[in-house]
Amino acid sequence: NKPIIYDYGYFKLLLFSTGFILFYIGSIFLSYESYSECATNFFFKHSGILLFLLIYLFTIYINLELGKGPDNRSKSQFTFEDSEEDEPMSCISADYRLSVKYNTFSPVDNGGPIDIGNPNKYRMSTLISKKNVILKSKVNESIKSTDNIEINEDVLKKIRKIQSVFVEEIVFYSVILIIFIIIIFFKGNNDNSVLDLKNENNLQNKNGEWSYECSLENIDVLFNLMEFIILLLILIKGNQLLNFENVFRCTRYITYSSIVGIITGPTIN
C-alpha cells in the first residue's frame, strides 16, 4: 500500500518555513553590541538562508528529472493493422495463407483461393480470421508491456536519483551547521582574549560614537559568496525548466525570484 514516489511536499514546506523562522531570528540581532549577539545573527541568518536555498534547488532538481524536456521523444508504439494491400498476411495456422482484402484463404501448397460461397470453407476462413485478430492483439499487448517496463525502470532510476540528492543535501546542510558552530567557538575564544588585552573590537568613529566590530564579519562574506553561487545555480537550472512540460508552476516563480536575489543580494548584504 506504499506509494511508489514518496511525497516530499510536507518536508519541503516544513523545512522552508523553518528556514524563514531561522532567518528572522537572526534578523533580530542584526544590530549587535557583543560577540554573542553577532554569533547569534551569523548562525541563524546563514542557516536559514542556506536551508530554503537548498529547498529551492531540490524542487528544481525534482522537476528536471521528472519533467518532460524539449528533447524528449515518446517511444514508438508498434501495432499491427490489417493491410489494405493485395499481398497476403501470415496466419496463425501453418497450413493456410489468409488474404485480408478478399477475405479468402488457401492452402500453402495450393495457390488457388477457396470461394467464400462454400459455407464450410467460409466458416473455416472466419475462424482463421478470428485467430489472426487474437494473435495481433496478443502481440500488441506484449509490445506495450515491454515499453511500459522500460518506462517504469527509467522512472524508478530517476526516483532513486532524487532520493539520493535529498540525502546529499541533508548531509551537506548538517556539515555546514557543524562548520558554523566550530567557527563561532573558535572566533569566540580569540575575541575574548583580544578584548581582555587590547579591546580592539570596540571602535570609535569621527563623531565620537562607539561601535562593535565582530570578527565573524570577514567569514560572513565567504558564506554570502557560497549562497550567491547556490542562487546562481538555481537560476541556471531553473532557466532550463522554462522549456519543460509537466512541471510545477512554482519553479517558474523560483527562477524569477532567483534573478531578483542575484541582483539585489550583494547590495542588501
Image (tube, rainbow, N blue to C red):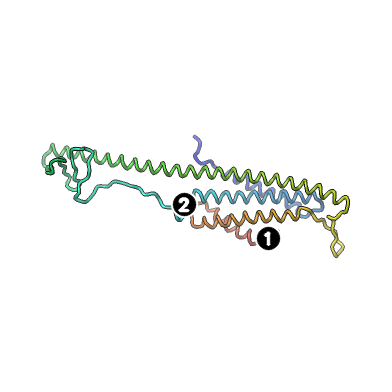
The amino acid on which the numbered mark 2 sits, given as a three-letter code, is Lys
Which residue is tagged 2?
Answer: 68
Mark 1 or 2, nearer chain start: 2
Q: Quadrant of the C terminus?
A: bottom right
Residue placed at 27% from the left, 47% from the top? 81
How far apart are the two marked residues, 1 and 2, measured between alpha carbons? 34 Å
Q: To which residue does mark 1 refer?
A: 266
Judge left or right: residue 134 versus residue 206: left
Secondary element under disc 2, as helix, strand or loop, is loop
Farthest residue, direction top: 1
Say if 121 sits above or below 62 in the image. Answer: above
The furthest residue to the bottom: 206
Q: Nearer the viewer, residue 252 or 62?
A: 62
**Residue positioned 62% across, 51% down in the render:** 53
Q: Residues within 10 Å of mark 1 (few under 14, many from 20)?
A: few
Q: Position of residue 50 (x, y in %)?
A: 65, 50
Q: Residue 187's spot in the image, x, y percent?
A: 78, 49
The picture places residue 179, in percent across and down from the top left corner, at 71, 46
Residue at 63%, 48% (x, y): give it: 16
Amino acid at circle 1: Pro
Q: Which mark is residue 118?
A: none
Residue farthest along the right direction in this orientation: 197
Instruction: Report whether 211 appears left or right of 256.
Output: right
Q: Nearer the viewer, residue 186 or 158?
A: 186
In the image, is residue 36 above or below residue 135?
Answer: below
Question: Residue placed farthest to the front in the image?
Answer: 109
Q: SS of the residue at dot 1?
A: helix
Q: Position of residue 131 (x, y in %)?
A: 24, 38
